[in-house]
Amino acid sequence: KVPVLILSFFQHALNSGIRRYHVAPVLCQRAKVAMSHFEPNEYINYEKLEKNINIVRKRLDRPLTLSEKIVYGHLDDPAKQEIERGKSYLRLRPDRVAMQDATAQMAMLQFISSGLPKVAVPSTIHCDHLIEAQSGGEKDLRRAKDINQEVYNFLATAGAKYGVGFWKPGSGIIHQIILENYSYPGVMLIGTDSHTPNGGGLGGICIGVGGADAVDVMAGIPWELKCPKVIGVKLTGKLSGWTSPKDVILKVAGILTVKGGTGAIIEYHGPGVDSISCTGMATICNMGAEIGATTSIFPYNARMKKYLGKTGRADIAALADEFKQHLVPDSGCQYDQVIEINLSELKPHINGPFTPDLAHPVSDIGAVAEKEGWPVDIRVGLIGSCTNSSYEDMGRSAAVAKQALAHGLKCKSKFTITPGSEQIRATIERDGYAEILREVGGLVLANACGPCIGQWDRKDIKKGEKNTIVTSYNRNFTGRNDANPETHAFVTSPEIVTALSIAGTLKFNPETDYLTGADGKKFKLEAPDADELPKLEFDPGQDTYQYPPKDGSGQHVDVSPTSQRLQLLEPFDKWDGKDLEDMLILIKVKGKCTTDHISAAGPWLKFRGHLDNISNNLLIGAINTENGKANSVRNALTQEFGPVPDTARYYKKMGVKWAVIGDENYGEGSSREHAALEPRHLGGRVIITKSFARIHETNLKKQGLLPLTFADPADYNKIHPVDKLSIVGLKDFAPGKPLKCIIKHPNGSQETIMLNHTFNESQIEWFQAGSALNRMKELQQKSS
């Protein structure tokens, strides 16, 4: 077995073009397989995983799900850790950390302020969020490098100093890079982006977190996670025709809704799994973020083995084969909920607008759109993104485009293509897919997030103009892609986006409807067929990786005190030991409030490393119950209406504490911790809602805020924007013990309600210290 592995590895290295991989002789030994080509001295430790699993299985005395095996296999203390799904907090030791450039700025600033000399686990930074889509890949990349030079230099030098690998702008989207290089069966990886679960397509537990969580792991501190429940999705049948892996998660999103997966891992299993490619499994896991899931995962199988081999990691696949019993669920394991989907009966879906869980079969969307008054003409079709930018995705889209070109047709809608990585871009250029997509009318954008996260300099419409776009992205919240609240965004598979862009209308169903060719003859598109992986080796394209030096202690990291893009962090103030009395209400939010509403992306991304500047976008997208408007709240001290950030700054200047009142699933969407840092920076103390999204609730705790929920959701209606609030009993703040809230109305009357929380003892210490980072420093000082 070993000689074959070595030969395979060397063959890949010789055929891989520009990028050359270091081959460590230690790879020849069993159980000494490197985690990645870029870290030849960091090894996969399946033996420890196996040992921990056996300890926990003996304790629990029951079959384990795959999710449990990998999560419990990474416990800091498997022998003593309390384990109860949905209740206990687990202390975990993840294998690695990944950060995208927008969130890495704040994460690295926090790590710098920790005073530690080097990261304790393999970590990487990926430059993908700061490249705006404008005129095409090369020009947009050059422009981004120029505009963001200060930030890129900071991240590159900080990476070099603290031992973090740096993927340069143009390398690709973080999640595609992770799938190609860093995810593997059984890994536990945390990433500062909500779509980190993409790595579950390779059988890993990959979880999106805020930057403060990443700092914990990089500092070598056990990472806390509430023990997740496990929702099983049993797949039967087989994918075929126009139905794609994207349709699986679009269907699941329609079933579970945007909060149905909160606090749970979605575990796919069953005979239908084997009909899905590895990158297709990644697509499904990626968009699990849209149902609030902690993460999603598939069991190790032949499709993963094939992908590992094609990406130069046959040695990892061979090792995974030896430990396969720990990389699949136990027979007879129990799930908290089971959903069954017959892939043979599943139809192509399209979800939206304005929310990713509004599911429709493609066959119905035209009629539904006409009934609802949604524009049926499609202005732009956009394929790619971290969810759907694999070789297979591009191949299936090109297969559709090729048929249209054969009949003399091009896209009626504008059409853009975002390759997921430099490797994908180079390979689809070599194999002709990119040229076909350009020929049908497409514009190939940079290897970056682009329009998916609002990095889109859109020119074809005016703001406020009602229009429809279709994308293969993952999110479609109001204004997310182009900052236009009247853009009706629908998410679907890349091949359906391509077909609809050719037809130019939502009323076209490629399964049944005909197009008219340039010769006037009608024709029907055949279901696309494409290779899941290239017949030749992947072309790695340009080398875009910067290795951290062995000793980075002499590296200088420059943050100018006059910079408008970067700002060193000052510690937040400690709790003063008193109850929070007579807080003003900054805003009572009506309806959906995602992290996009709390801390908008798009043009604000450039301030992600400067807390004071980015705080000028605090809650500007949230709707105020008092007047039904966004970014317009009453200043309780002046009685004048003004922007939310200005009002918060005024309260802070006057020394007045304030609170936010929110609705259901507050903070869903992105993992951006700025949505927690900003209210803390501007004087906020408490966020009270009907319910929270998982990542945002943790982020709020990390920054010393109190995320609380109504014991009775109807009490939301008792609080008015003009009231004052007091949180009493903080001296006795304890896990599982509700807090009392006194509502003081302007007429002098009072009401008392109870508020629940999910704080454990260590998280209460974060609150008391002012933040998790403050608490880390306290512990360091005690131990030194």
Image (cartoon, rainbow, N blue to C red):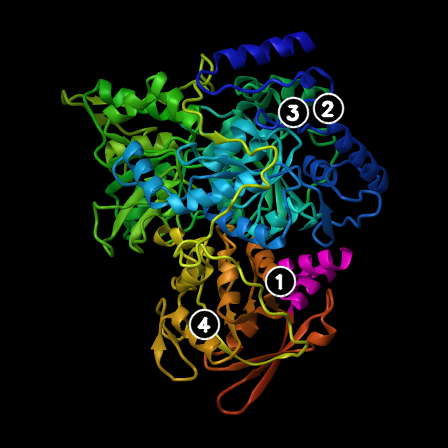
Secondary element type, mark 4: strand
Q: Give the spatial CA distance, label 1 vs label 3.
A: 36 Å
User: Relative to residue 713, is residue 340 depicted above or below?
Assistant: above
Which comes sooner in the sequence, label 2 or label 1? 2
Q: Residues within 10 Å of mark 1 (few under 14, many from 20)?
A: many
How many numbered marks does the figure carry? 4
Amino acid residing under circle 3: Ala
Secondary element type, mark 1: loop
Which comes sooner in the sequence, label 2 or label 3? 3
Q: Give the spatial CA distance, label 1 vs label 4.
A: 23 Å
What's drawn in magenta, residue-wise? 756-784
**Mark 3, residue position:** 34
- Which quarter of the rendering shows the C terminus? bottom right
Amino acid residing under circle 4: Ile
Residue 323: assigned label: 2
Which comes sooner in the sequence, label 4 or label 3? 3
Q: Which residue is drawn at 73% across and 17% down?
A: 29
On screen, residue 313 versus residue 777, left or right, reads left
Residue 703 at least partly seen: yes
Give whichever of 489, 306 is nearer the camera: 306
Closer to viewer: mark 2 or mark 3: 3
Residue 771: assigned label: 1
Residue 163, given in percent of the width and then of the height, sits at: 59, 38
